[in-house]
Amino acid sequence: MIDLYTSTTPNGWKASITLEELALPYETHYIRLGEGDQKKPEYLKINPNGRIPTIVDRDEDNFAVFESGAIMIYLAEKAGRLLPTEKKKRSQVIQWLMFQMGGVGPMQGQANVFYRYFPEKLPAVIARYQNETKRLYTVLDTRLADHEYLVDDYSIADIAHWAWVRIHYWAGVEIDDLPNLKRWMDIMAAKPACQKGILVPEPFNPEDTLSMAKKIVNVK
């Protein structure tokens, strides 16, 4: 049994979708970010960074894993699916996972902050992060022009990106001019595990998300 500590965010969805896709039994623990659950001492014991998600594998002496990408790799290896064992394919999946971790997530996350949450509208800053997010989306679109999935077969790399790109509108970034990305988005959205995973720990509610995020960035 896996204990999943999470909230309604793209990084949280990465873990819950992976768990659903791998059909691993798990119990959800809602970390309410706006209330500071992620900074409580009992949570910091399993995730010293005070972020979500985190998992604890009860079957492995309560082994804790934090950082969403590390969680995805751990779960894929545990189940023997969604991460190739062949050396080059495995490397490619991890490369694209790192592309999300180091690029799409941070850039889109900053676009979210300055477009949605920051009290002062800074056009140049908003444009900087929206443009970089769009550039990264264009890299994905180019890759998907001749690949059904990012690395041939469906993998954790696809889940990681879909969890973020699915709320592109929240960052004010459009994808109508990226047909390959849109085609892939439709395929991902039709997967039962994706549909279930984004409801954990509760459905995305824009008003609640806005209120929570403003608390986190100390916006009144």
Image (cartoon, rainbow, N blue to C red):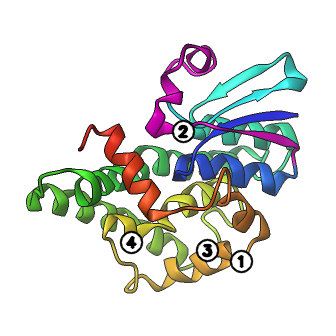
Q: Is residue 204 magenta?
A: no
Quarter assignment of residue 130: bottom left
**Residue type indicated by callout 2:** Arg
Which dot, 2 or 1, sits closer to the camera?
2
Closer to the camera in the image, 103 or 214: 214
Q: Which residue is found at the position 62% from the left and 15% from the top? A: 42
Secondary structure of the residue carrying tag 1 is loop
Mark 3 lies on residue: 147
**Label ID, residue 169:** 4
Mark 1 lies on residue: 190
> So how many labels did they put on this image?
4
Q: Residues within 10 Å of mark 2 (few under 14, many from 20)?
A: some
Task: Please state if 132 lies on the left or on the right of 83 as rendered.
Answer: left
Q: Visible in this render: residue 153?
A: no
Which of the two discs, 4 and 3, labels the residue nearer the N terminus? 3
Mark 1 vs mark 4, CA separation in Å? 19 Å
Which of the two discs, 4 and 2, labels the residue nearer the N terminus? 2
Secondary structure of the residue carrying tag 2 is loop
Position of the N terminus, as image quadrant, is: top right
